[in-house]
Amino acid sequence: WGITHDAQNRRFIVSDGSPYLHFWDDETLEESNPKILVTRQNGAPAKNLNELEFYKGLVLANVWYQEDIIAIDPETGDVIKEYDFSTLWPKSERRFQRADVLNGISVSDTDGELYVTGKKWNRIYRIELN
């Protein structure tokens, strides 16, 4: 599923497809904090947390089989912002409409810049989040 590193707090943040984030010590790999439930802005648990990136103090998570990336406060589990990327590359234009899903986030060395891609995508998009 997903793993990212929070260097300031010396921990890995891990997803397992459930609505929970797990925290592992970055040296021992032992669970270092209790897992937290991630709650979307509509109050529902955030199911299918997939690819993760740590970005500006938040965890960015791709939601598997959705065109969404959510920004999660790693201390509370609250979703701070939800980004809809369904118009980035419309499913109607994709070759494999079921399998072609948003599924990749990468933080650039350029401040404020990210890259996103997906399974079976032949393209990478450079984006900025507000």
Image (spheres, rainbow, N blue to C red):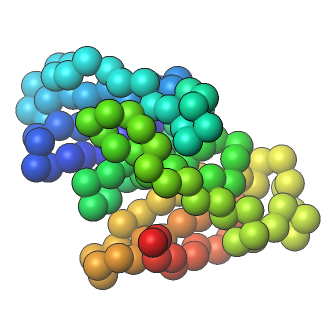
Residue drawn at (59%, 64%) of the image: 117
| Residue 97 image offset from top left, x and y in percent | 86, 54
Residue drawn at (9%, 32%) of the image: 27
| Residue 53 image offset from top left, x and y in percent | 37, 52
Name the image quarter holding the C terminus. bottom left
| Residue 45 image offset from top left, x and y in percent | 56, 27
Q: From the viewer's perspective, is residue 29 above or below residue 42? A: above
Camera sees residue 112: yes
Front-most of residues 32 and 73? 73
Instruction: Give the left or right position of residue 105, taking residue 103 as reference.
Output: left
Front-most of residues 3 and 49? 49
Outermost residue to the right: 92
Residue drawn at (42%, 63%) of the image: 106
Residue drawn at (57%, 76%) of the image: 125
Camera sees residue 29: no
Q: From the viewer's perspective, is residue 127 above or below residue 90? A: below
